[in-house]
Every structure is written in structure tokens, then in C-alpha cells.
């Protein structure tokens, strides 16, 4: 593995006949948007492109409606071209069933912005200072000399607006990039609403139940406080992954807690845990202690057991 630059990745992608682009499991707007933007750009240069994600969880309808979605192939239909690019996956494990496609490639590249990513490709474009992977993909497209039209810009905007929480924690450069994407033709009003402010009515019932059971642990995190909530498997029935993930952005608003955690039971006694912090607590080592990773202020991991057990596991590590 070699630390790389946008120019180096662009050189690797120049004049290649075919590329497989892999997005991470439980796909969000940054991984899908990045994958489709890169895929459309390469296809326009005559490259045979396939974009895939581990389809253990269905793609949310909103993301399936992004431009370039015709490039998506199901996991079991992936050809696995000699050149493979992973987008927004913090580790090889995040590619789940498609990890073998990545490792079998003659040439592999990762494009990612997670601080916990130590690199797992032949070339690794990793920048934890970037607000999202989409902005790194944009830098590669610029090196390739690709025109950023409204379709590519829309996919990149999807990653940017979601990973910055609608720009609530964006760096100055992200605002400049957003202006560039809007100038390219992004319908920001429509896509911001679709990606951030649209929920099925049943979501309200789920959120009401979850928030009603939220707990505050003031002494956690050396007195900085923890707030947590549990989303049981029964509440997730009929909900997309994206809908359940949105709960953490509500829980994290508690004034009395520096850290927020949401435990989501994706299967019987099987959990994913989303962590958020505000300013002082670095979540990467906490998530890593449980086999996960992410960013300083947004990380996650998986666990197993009863609700009480997985909560206890986290509390013991704080």
C-alpha cells in the first residue's frame, strides 16, 4: 500500500479499459454518490464501469434515484475488473462480501476520508481533513480533466451535504465546493430535502418510541456525559438503514452530553452502534476498541448480545 495523491490516482485510471468501483456495506450518500460520480466520469471516457455495494441491506430509494444509478450492479453480478477502486470504505471489512473482489484485483485503490483508515489498497488516497469522500473524488476528476456537469455534481453534492450535516460542521473549503457544484446545475433545494428532510410517517412513531427511552449518563466520558438510545429490531421493521441512522442526529443534540450513542438491532441480538461527539472526545479509539472506526467526531462499530449487554460494553470502555 502506498500513500497517494489525486494526481497519482488519476494516472492509474487513465486509459484503463475497465474499472470496478466498490461502495461500503449499508451504503450512505457519500459512498454511493462518490461511486456514481467517478463511474459516470470514467464511462464517458470509454471505460467499462460497474459500481456495486454489498447488498445485505437494500439501497435507500433516494440514493437509487441519483444520476448514474444504471451503473449499479448487484453484488452477485460483479465481474471484478483488473482495476478496482474502493470509495468511502474505512477498512477492507467495510466492503463485506465484496472484499474478495478488491483483494483479487491486479491493481487496487482506495479513496476515503476516515481517520481510522490505515490504507488497504495498492494506492491509498486518504485525507482525514476532507469533509467527505466526494470532495476527494472531485479532486481526482479534476486531475482527469473531466467536465463536472449537473449529473456528476449532483452525486458529489449528495455526499457533501449529508456528511457535513447540511454544512453544520463543514470546513470553509466545503462551502466553496458546494458553490461550484450548484453552479454546475445541482438542484440543491430538491436534493437537500430528499436526502435530509424526507421520512415515511412511520418514522415518527419509531423516533417517538426511541427518544422516550433515551438515557443520560452524566458521569460517563470523565464527566462530559453520554446520552444513548436503543432502536430495537421490531422498530426497524420496514425501515431503511438510512431512516434508523438519522436518529443519532436527534439524540446528539442533548445539551448535557458530549457523546451520543444509538444502538440499532439489525438482527436478533446483532447491533450496529453509531457514536457522535461534539468537541472534546475523540471517538476513533473508542470505536477501534470495539473493532470499528470512523472519524474523531463520528464513528461506529458492531456488537452482539442483549440490549443491556451492548450498552454495558460501551459504558465499560468510556
Image: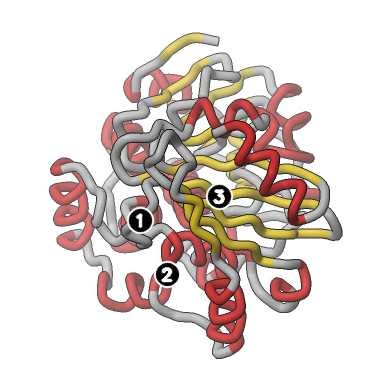
How crowded is the residue under tag 1: few (<14 C-alpha within 10 Å), some, or many (20+)?
A: some
**Can residue 284 be spotted in the picture?**
yes
Badges 3 and 1: C-beta atoms under 8 Å apart?
Answer: no
- Residue placed at 29% from the left, 40% from the top? 279
Residue denoted by label 3: 274
Query: Which sits in the foreground, 282 or 20?
Result: 282
Disc number placed over residue 195 in the picture, else none:
2
Q: Give me the residue at 69% from left, 32% from top.
A: 93
| Discs 1/2, front | 1
Percent across and percent down for residue 193 are 35, 77
**Quarter occupied by residue 183:** bottom left
Query: Which residue lies most toward the bottom here?
Result: 201
Give the structural element (helix, strand or loop) at label 1: loop
Between residue 313 and residue 90, name the one nearer to us: 313
Looking at the picture, how far across and down is residue 6, in whole percent? Answer: 34, 25
- Residue 82 place in picture, x, y as percent: 67, 25
Among numbered discs 1 and 2, the one appearing first in the sequence: 2
Looking at the image, how many numbered discs can be counted on the residues?
3
Q: Decide if residue 22 is on the left or right side of residue 284.
A: right
Q: Nearer the viewer, residue 97 or 183?
A: 97
Q: Is residue 213 above or below residue 132?
A: below
The residue that appears at 43% across and 50% down in the rendered structure is 37
Mark 2, other Cα within 10 Å: few <14 / some 14–19 / many ≥20: many
> In screen coordinates, is 172 left or right of 270?
left
- Please report the residue visible at 77 percent of the width from the left and 47 percent of the height from the top: 309
**Quarter of the image with the C terminus in it:** top right
The residue where tag 1 is placed is: 256
Q: Residue furthest right?
A: 268
Cα separation, mark 3 vs mark 1, equals 18 Å
Amino acid at each position: 500500500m502506498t500513500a497517494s495523491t489525486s494526481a497519482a490516482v488519476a494516472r492509474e485510471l487513465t486509459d484503463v479499459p475497465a474499472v470496478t468501483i466498490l461502495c461500503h456495506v449499508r451504503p450512505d450518500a457519500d459512498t454511493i454518490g462518490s461511486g456514481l460520480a467517478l463511474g459516470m466520469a470514467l464511462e464517458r471516457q470509454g471505460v467499462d464501469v460497474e459500481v456495486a455495494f454489498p447488498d445485505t441491506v437494500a439501497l435507500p430509494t433516494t440514493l437509487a434515484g441519483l444520476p448514474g444509478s444504471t451503473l449499479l450492479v448487484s453484488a452477485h453480478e460483479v465481474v471484478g475488473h483488473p482495476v478496482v477502486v474502493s470509495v468511502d470504505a474505512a477498512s477492507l471489512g467495510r466492503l463485506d462480501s465484496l472484499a474478495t473482489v478488491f483483494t483479487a484485483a491486479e491493481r487496487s485503490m482506495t479513496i476515503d476520508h476516515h481517520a481510522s483508515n490505515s490504507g488497504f489498497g495498492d494506492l491509498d488516497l486518504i485525507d482525514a481533513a476532507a469533509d467527505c469522500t466526494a470532495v476527494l473524488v472531485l479532486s481526482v476528476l479534476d486531475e482527469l480533466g473531466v467536465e463536472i456537469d449537473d449529473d456528476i455534481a449532483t452525486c458529489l453534492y449528495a455526499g457533501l451535504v449529508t456528511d457535513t450535516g447540511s454544512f453544520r460542521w463543514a470546513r470553509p473549503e466545503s462551502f466553496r465546493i458546494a458553490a461550484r457544484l450548484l453552479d454546475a446545475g445541482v438542484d440543491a433545494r430538491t436534493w437537500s430535502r430528499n436526502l435530509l428532510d424526507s421520512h415515511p410517517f412511520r418514522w415518527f412513531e419509531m423516533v417517538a418510541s426511541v427518544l422516550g427511552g433515551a438515557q443520560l449518563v452524566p458521569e460517563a466520558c470523565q464527566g462530559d456525559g453520554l446520552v444513548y438510545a436503543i432502536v430495537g429490531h421490531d422498530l426497524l421493521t420496514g425501515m431503511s438503514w438510512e431512516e434508523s441512522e438519522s436518529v443519532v442526529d436527534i439524540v446528539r443534540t442533548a445539551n448535557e452530553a458530549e457523546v451520543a450513542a444509538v444502538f440499532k438491532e439489525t438482527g436478533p441480538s446483532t447491533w450496529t452502534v453509531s457514536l457522535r461527539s461534539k468537541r472534546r472526545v475523540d471517538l476513533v479509539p473508542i470505536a477501534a476498541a470495539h473493532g470499528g472506526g470512523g472519524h474523531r467526531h463520528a464513528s461506529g462499530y458492531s456488537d452482539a448480545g442483549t440490549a443491556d449487554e451492548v450498552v454495558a460494553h460501551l459504558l465499560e470502555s468510556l
